[in-house]
Image: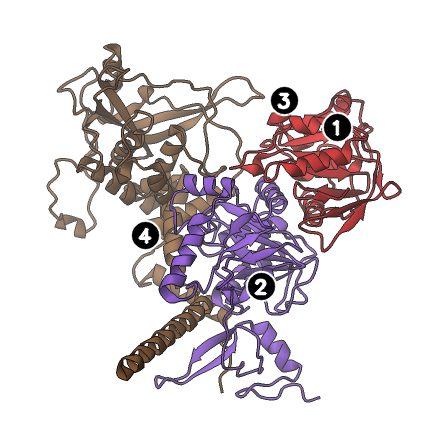
Chain colours: A red, B purple, C brown
């Protein structure tokens, strides 16, 4: 990219460095995401990620760098949008349009602790094209250490347990509601600084 | 290869393919339209599988490519060479060593394990296409889960032949929702797809579709209570390794009706032979 | 003893060597140069550029040389190269009204402003083999008045002034679909259909257009205007904010004028079919214009009952790179599936023989 991380301390509002070796770093991060999407609920560690600007975490930035580009409009919630550097950083590296209309977003970025009431507003695709739905990147504090939820569905051998800290209270209910719309629905990528968990629309959350 | 990116495709194309793969995994069995690119190999010769593999492959992968179950068939050789040239990754003929397996028409005999990815080359992804040629119609049928015409077709087979007369590319239902074509694998391989620990990805380049079966997902071959799904069986064993339960190729020996049967999965057959198994026409290999 | 066939890799290498040898032909004959192909096989170059969706005469000529003159193979080579090219910009629409025309004819008017200009055409040649060309010949005398600097108003604009022809949507700012980036989706808009036809196989598009003339969807076409010549390609990079010309290309444009009997809400008027190709590819541009008009059946409220009006049928089967690949993939080994079919047919025959034998026994017992 245009800057060298050693020499330049970016000004507020300026982008930070992206992937060190974009071709291979994007592939590596994608494989982590694919592993997570193929095994819903599995905590997949992502290592050697570039720094994240304020309001974003490393894994959520890495997901954007790996998957978002000029063909995929991105929506960010108010807390993230308020951080000029966060938006500049993503836009600079991904070249993606930023949309304020959640139903037009192919990717969405949510702050840590957000309740997921906003999920309803995103694109859920249609019965004919369920793949056109928004992929929602939800930032969280960590995995484990909270209340365990039992999960099952495609990609899970029998069942698995997962706890997430730093998400809103309505989180699991929103995930359940989302699964009701199948085959329509959004797919969630829960990101922390070091790891990612995917909760696609096929996930079954046990009560 | 000079002048070309790692794995041939440019990064924007890879991102597009990767996004399609993720949606495919999230909606098991649903065909995701994608902006399939022109590849330097002909359409119909594995361009969908090649694009999926190119989207997924990384420097640490170990790649195996098979066609008809064999690593040495010309098209498998050609595709393996393509990736060896464009990525420099390690290639293997051993199913157990591979992290990524691209296949045409077979699933390896040896059960795949968690973490492996199986990429299928798909000629016609739409299971309803030969019953309804219009994409606008079949898309609606999938949306409504309206698969009656497929059941009628299979039932007509039974009425006419006393059995379902489909021996390959036998339709399956994935996760109790989407009707899916497994690509032209023999129906012998269908049961392997059910609850497979490995991730299964399907690429149709000319038809511009990607679909997937996540690991541990229910895959059911269509059948009727009074006509349950059955796989092919042979009276013979593999002539080289003696295997009693692998898919066999019939090899014509002369023009007098002489023939022999050998495993279609060449790695499976060779591994068995080096483990000391020997068929009626084979020779003892692992004596030590 | 049987040994599984080995040596695929070696066989492929040998095949490639044989191919290279046959491409070169008799080494006693001087090798054909790319420049010669570009200059003297220019219509082949034009077809390869048109269906290859890449305007580059040198690369198209190279592809033809490499493909031993197999134009579909050459188109494939050019397309496979084209996919690897980064996109810097999208050009503004080319302005064919401002074309420096070398050929311009209209079948609907005896004469018209700017005049009829035959230009370099096979039309009116007598198709007699010219044995003089068996020997290498001198360059012919330069023809006079090869181009026309006069403004050439469009025939369709003349009709438009009278309100006799449908208005063309001239929204140049609307986003344009690109089927090399997004797969076909139906119903397909006209921009997508035109792109598909422009890339489509000349033979297929020609046959489809021909079928529409023979009664499988008669659209009563008149060749309103055909023009061929040079147009400027202009891009407007966002960072610059103004337009710059990046060069001239040769194109052939055909506007067909077709009858439309009108509907409950619309008065009778003429409708349009449009064709455009790179270089001189007049047959293609005309066929494209016929098929374009046929495919507009849905939007014009005409009944869709013929192949050339059926957008799924036409658009899914125009592409010769796709078609050639899939037809020829039947050469690949299919012995695993064939084995399944063998087993099935043998079983079905055995069962039928069994049933037949039982019937015979029952009959004999009666």
- Distance of label 4 from label 1 (alpha carbons): 52 Å
- In depth, the one of B227 and C34 nearer the eye is B227
- Identify the residue at horizontal 24%, vertical 42% (top origin): C207
Residue A18 location in percent, x, y? 73, 36
- Residues at discs 2 and 3 in contact (Cβ within 8 Å): no
- Distance of label 2 from label 1 (alpha carbons): 51 Å
- In depth, the one of B72 and C11 nearer the eye is B72
Chain on which label 1 sits: A
- Which of label 2 and label 1 is nearer to you? 2
User: Which residue has dot 3 on it?
Assistant: A101
Residue B277 location in percent, x, y? 63, 84
- Which of label 3 and label 4 is nearer to you? 3
Marks 4 & 1 on one chain: no
- Distance of label 3 from label 4 (alpha carbons): 53 Å
User: Which residue has dot 2 on it?
Assistant: B191
Q: Which mark is residue C69?
A: 4
Chain on which label 2 sits: B
- In depth, the one of B60 and C163 nearer the eye is C163
User: Which residue has dot 1 on it?
Assistant: A15
- Residues at discs 3 and 1 in contact (Cβ within 8 Å): no
- Which of label 3 and label 1 is nearer to you? 3
- Residues at discs 2 and 1 in contact (Cβ within 8 Å): no
């Amino acid at each position: 990219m245009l800057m060298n991380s050693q020499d330049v301390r970016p000004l507020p509002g300026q982008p930070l460095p992206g992937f060190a070796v974009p071709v291979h770093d994007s592939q590596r991060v994608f494989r982590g995401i694919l592993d997570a999407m193929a095994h819903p609920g599995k905590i997949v560690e992502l290592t050697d990620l570039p720094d994240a600007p304020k309001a974003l975490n490393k894994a959520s930035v890495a997901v954007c760098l790996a998957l978002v580009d000029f063909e995929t409009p991105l929506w960010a919630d108010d807390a993230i949008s308020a951080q000029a550097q966060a938006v500049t950083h993503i836009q600079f590296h991904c070249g993606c349009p930023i949309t304020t209309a959640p139903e037009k977003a192919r990717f969405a970025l949510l702050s840590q602790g957000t309740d997921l009431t906003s999920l309803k507003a995103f694109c859920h695709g249609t019965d004919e094209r369920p793949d056109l739905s928004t992929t929602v990147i939800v930032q969280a504090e960590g995995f484990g250490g909270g209340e365990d939820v039992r999960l099952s569905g495609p990609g899970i051998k029998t069942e698995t347990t997962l706890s997430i800290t730093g998400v809103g209270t309505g989180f699991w209910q929103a995930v359940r509601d989302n699964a009701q719309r199948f085959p329509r629905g959004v797919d969630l990528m829960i990101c922390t600084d070091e790891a990612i968990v995917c909760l696609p629309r096929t996930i079954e959350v046990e009560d | 290869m000079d002048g070309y990116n790692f794995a041939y495709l440019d990064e924007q194309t890879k991102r597009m393919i990767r996004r399609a793969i993720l949606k495919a995994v999230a909606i098991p069995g649903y065909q995701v339209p994608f902006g399939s690119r022109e590849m330097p190999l002909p359409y119909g010769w594995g361009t969908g599988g090649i694009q999926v593999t190119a989207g997924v492959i990384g420097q640490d992968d170990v790649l195996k490519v098979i066609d008809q179950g064999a690593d040495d068939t010309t098209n498998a050789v050609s595709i393996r060479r393509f990736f060896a040239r464009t990525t420099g990754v390690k290639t293997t003929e051993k199913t157990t060593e591979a992290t990524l397996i691209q296949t045409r028409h077979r699933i390896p005999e040896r059960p795949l394990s968690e973490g492996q990815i199986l990429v299928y080359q798909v000629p016609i992804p739409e299971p309803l296409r030969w019953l309804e040629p219009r994409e606008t119609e079949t898309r609606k049928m999938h949306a409504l889960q309206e698969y009656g015409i497929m059941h009628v077709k299979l039932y007509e087979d039974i009425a006419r032949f006393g059995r379902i007369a489909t021996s390959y590319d036998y339709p399956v239902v994935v996760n109790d929702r989407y009707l899916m074509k497994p690509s032209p694998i023999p129906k012998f391989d269908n049961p392997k797809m059910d609850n497979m620990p490995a991730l299964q990805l399907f690429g149709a380049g000319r038809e511009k579709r990607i679909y997937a079966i996540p690991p541990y997902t229910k895959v059911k071959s269509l059948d009727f209570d009074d006509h349950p799904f059955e796989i092919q069986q042979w009276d013979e064993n593999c002539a080289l390794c003696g295997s009693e339960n692998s898919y066999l190729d019939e090899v014509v020996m002369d023009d007098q009706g002489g023939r022999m049967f050998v495993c279609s999965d060449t790695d499976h057959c060779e591994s068995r032979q080096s483990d000391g198994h020997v068929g009626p026409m084979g020779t003892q290999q692992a004596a030590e | 003893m049987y040994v599984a066939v080995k040596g695929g890799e070696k066989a492929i290498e040998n095949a490639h060597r044989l191919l290279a040898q046959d491409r070169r032909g008799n080494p006693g004959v001087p090798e054909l140069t790319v420049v010669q192909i570009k200059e003297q096989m220019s219509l082949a170059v034009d077809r390869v550029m048109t269906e290859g969706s890449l305007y580059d005469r040198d690369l198209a000529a190279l592809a033809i040389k490499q493909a031993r003159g197999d134009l579909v193979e050459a188109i494939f080579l050019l397309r496979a190269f084209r996919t690897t090219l980064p996109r810097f910009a999208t050009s503004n629409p080319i302005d064919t009204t401002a074309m420096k025309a070398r050929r311009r004819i209209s079948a609907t008017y005896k004469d018209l402003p700017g005049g009829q200009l035959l230009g370099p055409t096979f039309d009116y040649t007598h198709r007699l083999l010219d044995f003089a060309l068996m020997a290498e010949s001198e360059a012919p005398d330069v023809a006079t008045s090869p181009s026309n600097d006069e403004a050439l108003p469009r025939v369709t604009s003349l009709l438009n002034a009278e309100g006799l022809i449908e208005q063309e949507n001239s929204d140049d700012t609307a986003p344009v679909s690109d089927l090399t980036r997004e797969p076909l989706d139906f119903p397909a808009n006209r921009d997508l259909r035109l792109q598909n036809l422009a890339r489509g196989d000349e033979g297929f598009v020609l046959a489809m257009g021909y079928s529409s003339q023979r009664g499988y969807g008669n659209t009563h076409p008149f060749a309103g205007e055909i023009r061929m010549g040079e147009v400027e390609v202009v891009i407007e990079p966002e960072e610059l904010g103004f337009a710059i010309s990046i060069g001239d290309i040769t194109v052939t444009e055909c506007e067909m004028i077709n009858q439309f009997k009108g509907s409950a809400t619309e008065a009778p008027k003429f409708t349009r079919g449009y064709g455009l190709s790179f270089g001189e590819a007049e047959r293609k541009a005309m066929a494209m214009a016929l098929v374009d008009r046929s495919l507009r059946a849905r939007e014009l409220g005409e009944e869709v009952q013929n192949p050339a009006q059926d957008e799924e049928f036409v658009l899914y089967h125009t592409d010769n790179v796709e078609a050639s690949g899939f037809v020829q993939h039947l050469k690949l080994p299919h012995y695993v599936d064939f084995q399944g079919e063998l087993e099935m047919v043998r079983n079905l025959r055995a069962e039928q023989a069994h049933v037949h034998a039982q019937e015979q026994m029952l009959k004999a017992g009666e």
